[in-house]
């Protein structure tokens, strides 16, 4: 009789307690699991004995904080000698950084870590997202309920307003007279012949210790004008008057003439200038003899008349004293003008009012823009004839490069604006010795140490 095979009979052949019986593979798997856990605990314990917190790190620190790579407790909370992974508190940041307020009227102060998130590699912590700024500036409110700034800005490339210095329509407040178009002409007379000026002849980056900085230094007479515009006051002297106040110039001129006439007393006898009303009649030679004070007073008046009415007035706005016109009109042959009356007739020079910084609430780095020509941004320089013209580029010029395109330059808020007000920053005393710092640096990997060195340059 043939054997009948059914599923029930087949199922009865399966040992339902197979998983309770140890087998070679099960034993290896168990011991490997136990060994892995033991190794992990031993690895963590080994780091704990060496007081190295790398095992807890969520990633590489920024270049500025790389020195703390093996010392997590410098920022994160510890309790009873044990380390806990917790969000860094503002107190931990303020131990080293002052972090002054952005604006006294701000509605709230965000936490440090909400904007500056570390453990993302060798980044600059100042490179924050626009969302950190637009959480307030997209709908700006202040404690007083009124703001002097534009209340709705979401990005530079979309709704950022025109720069304030151009938006108001006001001219440059300087009283210095300067014609850009005239100075950009070809074949100007220079100290060594004909020259063609370029922007860099007058506009130069400021330097500290011989290294250029990000700021453009103001054009000054000594640095940019003196080589072409001299301050000669009399053909007897090679030296020039100082570029200073009228009082100092007057004292210099008087001293020079007094020293000269003391060394050349023969010049006290001068030929009187004849009256040319009757040109056909012969005029006999007529000499006059002056005293040294009279000679000095007369020639000082002539020299200062040239300085005030022509040389200085070429650039400066001069306000003459009430008796200035009368003093200059005194006939030279009378020589009655005293040094005291000349001093009283000195003009006053209007303050130059040269704008040191057109963007008081933003930063700009000329050194980073040297790839483009000056006229690419300052297009009106060759045609401007008034010193009141503001030759700054508008926001449309900046947006040509700084936008949201794939090949565009950085256009986030931090590129031009700083959250923390640097004028409110306070000195923060250190709390670590050089030996402790060098000891921790020696325990860092070579790559981290080079990152710190590069970040400090």
Image: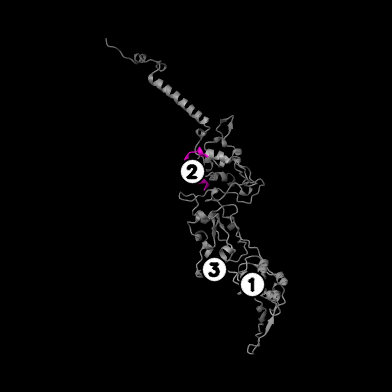
Q: Nearer the viewer, mark 2 or mark 1?
A: 2
Q: Is residue 372 above or below residue 93?
A: below
Q: Is residue 25 left or right of residue 308?
A: left
Provide residue 204's location: percent of width, then percent of height. Answer: 54, 59
Which residue is identified by label 3?
182
Counting the numbered discs, the total is 3
Predominant SS of the magenta segment: helix
Query: How crowded is the residue under tag 1: few (<14 C-alpha within 10 Å), some, or many (20+)?
Result: few
For the N terminus, the image quarter is top left
Give x and y (percent) for residue 351.
Answer: 65, 63
Instruction: State the residue at coordinates (56%, 42%).
Output: 115
Q: Nearer the viewer, residue 23 or 12?
A: 23
**Separation of disc 2 and disc 1 at Cα?**
62 Å
First in sequence: mark 1 vs mark 3: 3
User: Which numbered tag is attached to residue 450?
Assistant: 2
On the image, numbered disc 1 is attached to which residue? 309
Element at badge 1? helix
Number of other residues with Cα within 10 Å of mark 2, as a class: few under 14, some 14 to 19, many 20 or more: some
> Is residue 159 highlighted in magenta?
no
Q: Which residues are magenta?
A: 441-457
């Amino acid at each position: 009789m043939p054997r009948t095979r059914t599923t029930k009979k087949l199922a009865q052949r399966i040992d339902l307690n197979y998983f309770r019986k140890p087998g070679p593979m099960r034993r290896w798997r168990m011991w490997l699991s136990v060994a892995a856990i033991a190794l992990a605990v031993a690895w963590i314990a080994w780091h704990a004995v060496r007081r190295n917190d790398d095992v807890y790190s969520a990633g590489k620190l920024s270049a500025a904080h790389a020195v703390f790579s093996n010392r997590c407790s410098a920022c994160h909370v510890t309790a009873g000698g044990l380390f806990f992974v917790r969000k860094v508190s503002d107190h931990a940041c303020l131990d080293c950084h002052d972090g002054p307020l952005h604006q006294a009227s701000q509605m709230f102060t965000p936490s440090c870590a909400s904007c500056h998130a570390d453990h993302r590699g060798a980044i600059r912590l100042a490179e924050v997202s626009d969302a950190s700024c637009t959480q307030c500036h997209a709908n700006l409110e202040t404690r007083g309920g009124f703001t002097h700034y534009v209340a709705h800005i979401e990005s530079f490339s979309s709704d950022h307003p025109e720069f304030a210095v151009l938006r108001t329509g006001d001219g440059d407040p300087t009283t210095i007279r300067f014609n850009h178009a005239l100075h950009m002409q070809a074949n100007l007379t220079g100290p060594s012949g004909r020259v063609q000026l370029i922007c860099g002849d007058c506009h130069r980056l400021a330097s500290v210790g011989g290294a250029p900085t990000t700021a453009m230094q103001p054009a000054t007479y000594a640095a940019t004008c003196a080589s072409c515009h001299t301050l000669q006051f009399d053909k007897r002297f090679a030296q020039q008057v100082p570029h200073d106040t009228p009082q100092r110039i007057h004292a210099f001129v008087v001293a020079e003439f007094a020293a000269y006439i003391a060394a050349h007393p023969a010049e006290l006898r001068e030929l009187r200038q004849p009256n040319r009303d009757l040109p056909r009649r012969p005029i006999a030679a007529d000499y006059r003899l002056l005293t040294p004070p009279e000679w000095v007073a007369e020639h000082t008046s002539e020299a200062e008349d040239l300085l005030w009415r022509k040389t200085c007035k070429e650039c400066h706005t001069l306000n003459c004293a009430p008796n200035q016109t009368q003093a200059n009109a005194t006939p030279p042959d009378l020589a009655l003008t005293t040094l005291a009356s000349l001093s009283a007739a000195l003009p006053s020079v209007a303050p130059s009012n040269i704008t040191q910084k057109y963007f008081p609430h933003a930063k700009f780095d000329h050194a980073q823009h040297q790839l483009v020509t000056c006229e690419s941004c300052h297009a009106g320089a060759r045609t401007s004839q008034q010193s009141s013209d503001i030759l700054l580029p508008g926001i449309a010029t900046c947006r040509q490069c700084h936008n949201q395109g794939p090949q565009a330059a950085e256009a986030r808020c931090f590129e031009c604006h700083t959250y923390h007000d640097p004028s409110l920053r306070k000195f923060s005393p250190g709390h670590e010795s050089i030996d402790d710092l060098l000891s921790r640096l020696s325990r860092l990997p070579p790559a981290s140490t080079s990152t710190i060195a590069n970040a400090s340059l």
